[in-house]
Amino acid sequence: MKKVALVGLGFMGKMHYDVYSQRKDAKVYAIAEQDKRKLKGDWSSISGNIKGNKPAAVNLKGIKMVADYHELIGDKNIDWVDICLPTFMHKKVASDFLKAGHNVLVEKPVCPTLKDARELLSLKNKNKGTFMIAQCIRFWPGWNWAAEAIKKKKYGKVMHASFKRVSPPVLGWKSWFRDPNKSGGALLDLHIHDVDFIRWVFGKPQKILASGRKGKTGISHIYASYLYKGFTVCAEGGWDMPASYPFNMYFSIVCEKATLEYDLSKNPPFTVFLNGGKTIIPKIKTTTGWQEEIDYFISLIKGNKKQTFIKDREVLDTLAIIEKEKQSIITGKLKGF
Ligand SMILES: NC(=O)c1ccc[n+]([C@@H]2O[C@H](COP(=O)([O-])OP(=O)(O)OC[C@H]3O[C@@H](n4cnc5c(N)ncnc54)[C@H](O)[C@@H]3O)[C@@H](O)[C@H]2O)c1
């Protein structure tokens, strides 16, 4: 039985807790969380923009509950540490655990800036622990199917593609999401899922043109075009939607022989529309990307393999693309690499 220490028990920490609770080969051994009510098992305050299991009173018998994560550093019972803290804390906390030899899974975005990410990855490379950023969309059933189909040119070349990810605003602990220095705003926090997927599947674009809405909480809504040789990809993302608007993620990838569409608001969400008039509903898993990424990470821990799926170069490119988008939004200019 593998043992995980969860650090941060907010919306994502609870989501990861639920994933571990469903597994037979792993269990939550410890939780570090500064909120005293959560430490005592009252999780009723946990909320986010996506529906999960309703948080309630939880029986924490057998789980080492600590307010200060430093108490977990060096604990030999821990097989890995799963960091679900606000983004601006990732670098310091991940570094503390990595330096002590721990394996670390850290939520996306890895850090609020490219500079911080570079420094953390460099530190990670000097230490032995297995390290992975939880870029869940690469693992998301339907999205991984589409990625594979595009890479293998199953439906010919891509002619163009569009992505959309929208949500009501989120606040988080002490409203940290509303501070662009802490969360990076919607541009980084939400839109990174699509930027990372686009970078992973289509490569680095030649040029980027972006516009968006900028306010006190940073760039809260983005319209970006990524110009490649022979085709264009665009992505809309933001958290300006009203509270009544359900979170949605969407893509439409138009290839020579078919269009691949994923729309979370539909059931089933993923369809392949063939040029000849037929449609295919590919058989995809009913799991979430969170379950799949954790499954992958546990397989790394068990096999003692090196993590090669999410490469440092890709992580840095994704953050560099987002920084170019920010410059394009501010200046109104096309940005190249
Ligand atoms: N992969 C996804 O789909 C997804 C979705 C939402 C959030 N996220 C990411 O997950 C991370 C966490 O976001 P969230 O929505 O869970 O935030 P949140 O505000 O809901 O939770 C943060 C938790 O950290 C706790 N905390 C703060 N300081 C602490 C400390 N020093 N020690 C221990 N606990 C501390 C807070 O009390 C709170 O419970 C962020 O990086 C966010 O971008 C990812």
Image (cartoon, helix red, strand yellow):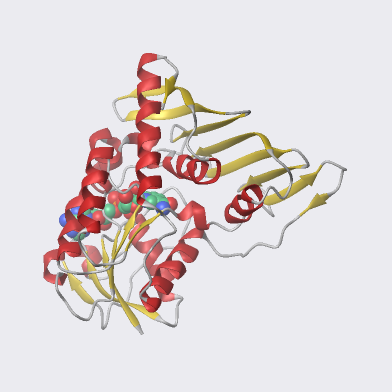
Foreground residue among 202 and 274:
202
Locate residue 336: give its quadrant: top left
**Is 335 above or below relative to 169?**
above
| Quarter of the figure with residue 43 | bottom left
Please identify the quarter of the rendering in which residue 102 is found.
bottom left
The percent position of residue 285, horizontal first and vertical second, equals 62, 65
Most extreme residue toward the top is 332
Residue 166 position in % (x across, y down): 50, 38
43 to the left or right of 155: left
Q: Which residue is drawn at 47% across and 36% down?
A: 204
Query: Is residue 113 visible to the viewer in this orientation of the structure?
Result: no
Say which residue appears at 65% left-offset and 62% top-offset. 284
Q: In this view, does 243 lie to the left or right of 143?
A: left
Q: What x and y, as percent, mark residue 210?
A: 46, 23
Q: Residue at x 46, y 55 (%)?
A: 136
On the image, the x and y values in percent for residue 275 come to: 83, 41
Say whether residue 92 is left or right of residue 209: left
* Number of marks drawn: 0
Rendered view: 6 above or below 323: below
Residue 209, above or below 233:
above
- Relative placement, left or right, of 232 versus 73 is right
Give the quadrant of the C terminus. top left
Q: Nearer the viewer, residue 52 or 78?
A: 78
The one nearer the camera, 270 or 65, is 270
User: Can see residue 283?
Assistant: yes
Pick the quarter of the image with the N terminus. Answer: bottom left
